[in-house]
C-alpha cells in the first residue's frame, strides 16, 4: 500500500517578496539554490527563508518596532531556527543603492553581499565584535565567489 507524502504547512524553500517598492530579483532560482547550498556548506539543514525587499522607511519601522533601533540599515535578519535554518530577511533596496554608489561598486554585488550576509546570520554568525565582523566578511567573500554568474 502506498501512502501519500505528507507536506509541511508550507513548502521548504526560499521565497522573495517586495514591500513598498517595485523590485524584482533576477535569477531567483539560481539565487535560491546558492542560498540553500551555502546553508548546506555551513553544515546546516535548510527549511525555509523569506527575503523581503523593501524601502528605507519600511525597514526603519521594523527596526524601531522590533529592535528599538532608531536608525536606517540595509538588512535585518530574524532567525526562527538555526538547524534546520528558518527565518526572514528584510533588505532595503534604497539603502543598498546608496551603499553601492558610495562604495563605487555595482548594485548587484552589494545586493548579493547583503543576501549572503543575512543567510550567514541565519546560520548563526554574528557581527557584533571586530573579530566576528572579520569572520563574517571572509565568509561573505567566500560564498560570493561561489555565486553562479
Image: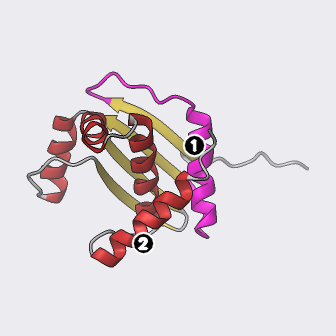
Q: Is residue 35 visible?
A: yes
Residue 125 placed where, x, y %?
A: 41, 69
Residue 143 placed where, x, y %?
A: 55, 57
Quadrant of res 97: top left
Q: Which residue is drawn at 58% across and 58% down?
A: 38
Q: Residue at x 27, y 46 (%)?
A: 74
Q: Residue at x 54, y 61 (%)?
A: 142
For disc 1, the marked residue is: 32
Query: In the image, 63: left or right of 93?
Result: left
Q: Is mark 2 on a helix, strand or loop?
A: helix
Which disc is residue 135 wearing? Answer: 2
In this view, the residue farthest toward the left is 70
In this view, the residue farthest toward the top is 22
Which disc is residue 73 wearing? Answer: none
Q: Which of marks 2 and 1 is nearer the N terminus?
A: 1
Front: mark 2 or 1:
2
Up-down: is 132 above or below 116? below
Q: Is mark 1 on a helix, strand or loop?
A: helix
Query: In the image, 12: left or right of 65?
Result: right
Q: Which of 81 and 52 is in front in this view?
A: 52
Amino acid at each position: 500500500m502506498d501512502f501519500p507524502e505528507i507536506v509541511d504547512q508550507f513548502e521548504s524553500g526560499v521565497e522573495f517578496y517586495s514591500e513598498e517598492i517595485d523590485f524584482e530579483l533576477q535569477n531567483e532560482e539560481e539565487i535560491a539554490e546558492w542560498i540553500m547550498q551555502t546553508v548546506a556548506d555551513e553544515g546546516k539543514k535548510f527549511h525555509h527563508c523569506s527575503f523581503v525587499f523593501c524601502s528605507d522607511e519600511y525597514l526603519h519601522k521594523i527596526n524601531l518596532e522590533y529592535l528599538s533601533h532608531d536608525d536606517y540599515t540595509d538588512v535585518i535578519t530574524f532567525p526562527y531556527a538555526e538547524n534546520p535554518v528558518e527565518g526572514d530577511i528584510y533588505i532595503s533596496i534604497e539603502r543598498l543603492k546608496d551603499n553601492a554608489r558610495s562604495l563605487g561598486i555595482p548594485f548587484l554585488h552589494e545586493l548579493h553581499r547583503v543576501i549572503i550576509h543575512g543567510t550567514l546570520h541565519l546560520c548563526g554568525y554574528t557581527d557584533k565584535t571586530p573579530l566576528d565582523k572579520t569572520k563574517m566578511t571572509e565568509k561573505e567573500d567566500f560564498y560570493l565567489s561561489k555565486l553562479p554568474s
